[in-house]
Amino acid sequence: MKASPRTIPVGTLIALAVLFAPALHAAPKLPKVIVSHEGKADFQTVQEAVDHAPDAGEIIHIAPGTYKEKLSITKSNIHLVGTGSLPQDVILTYNDSSKSAGGTSRSASIIVSGDGFEAENLTMENTWEIEHPEKENRSQAVALLVLSDRAVFDRVRFIGAQDTLYPNSRTCRDGESAQPCVSSRQLFNDCYVEGHVDYIFGNANAVFDHCELHSRVHDTVTITAQSRHFPTEVSGYTFLHCRITGPDNGNRVYLGRPWRDYSTVLFYDTEMVQPMDPDGWVEWGGRLKTSTYREYLSHGPGVNGGHRIVSSPELSAAEKAALTPGKILAGSDRWDAEAEAKKLRAE
């Protein structure tokens, strides 16, 4: 049975301002340090470099290698820059799970709560399922939990299985609150995300621009589980010019399912290489009727179109023009996410 069409205009998805945005931020000139297991370096572990960073922030250059650390980054303006030729050359990894750590958030290999966080040209992973492939050991296992506002990820690989990437907000955790939360703004540019069940989930206002979403083998794959709590909350996941890949082995692959009542996700100009389930989306607790799920200009051999369980009202010219990372994430402080991503590549 199809869900009833939503009367909320698609413009609510394309949020151009955050309700209670922070004041304008002057970009600090950040010191630089080097982390390496070998040779001349300021630190041998990433956590040590973060702990010694000044309160204003720091640019941390990470030499090629594998760094098995459970990272906690609470300071603002921490920038992690992999110095290898490829994102695969610098790997930040751990292997906790919800079962072993005592909760999904605690399972994260990396937790970032400081605003202005940036990462470029590296890999963040959780190897729990790789190391514990038995069905009885399957569990949520987060590679990155990011709560940071004004966060930028450029050419970053996120590797995991269930609940790989957790783009979330600090103040959006209480579904019973009478007040809308302030969602964190996050840009994922030219990134790679791998997983199977709900492998991108949370309630940040996040844009994925030119990213690859790679679905691992599982009976039922759900790419997103967005968790917007309130109809007036400025949060949602927007996928622009992305690519969905993965094995064609008869698994049911969905664009997402609604974790919370007002789950909000938009896919625009998506190349679907992996075959999608014709429904596109899947129900969770009867929340499809209040969720805002949209899909436009999908193409490729895996589209499997002709039927979707929710409808996508036609976009106006103004709504199409607003589908850029800079406009979606601007907020009242006019944060320029695209300019920040370009600057990060120069660090």
Image (spheres, rainbow, N blue to C red):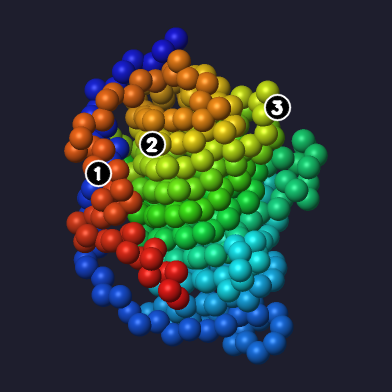
- Helix, strand or loop at label 3? It is loop
User: Residue at image x 22%, y 68%?
Assistant: 24
* 280 displayed left or right of 172: right
Q: Nearer the viewer, residue 95 or 34?
A: 34
User: Residue at image x 51%, y 59%?
Assistant: 155
* 336 displayed left or right of 261: left
Q: Residue 250 placed where, x, y %?
A: 68, 23
Callout 3, which amino acid? Answer: Asn
Q: CA distance from mark 1 to mark 2?
A: 12 Å
Determine whether 84 is above or below 150 in the image.
Answer: below
Q: Mark 1 or 3 closer to N-term?
A: 3
Can residue 78 be seen at all in this image of the molecule?
A: no
Q: Quadrant of the N terminus?
A: top left
Q: Quadrant of the C terminus?
A: bottom left
Residue position marked by numbered label 3 in the rendering: 249
Answer with the quarter of the image where residue 174 lies.
top left
Residue position marked by numbered label 1 in the rendering: 322
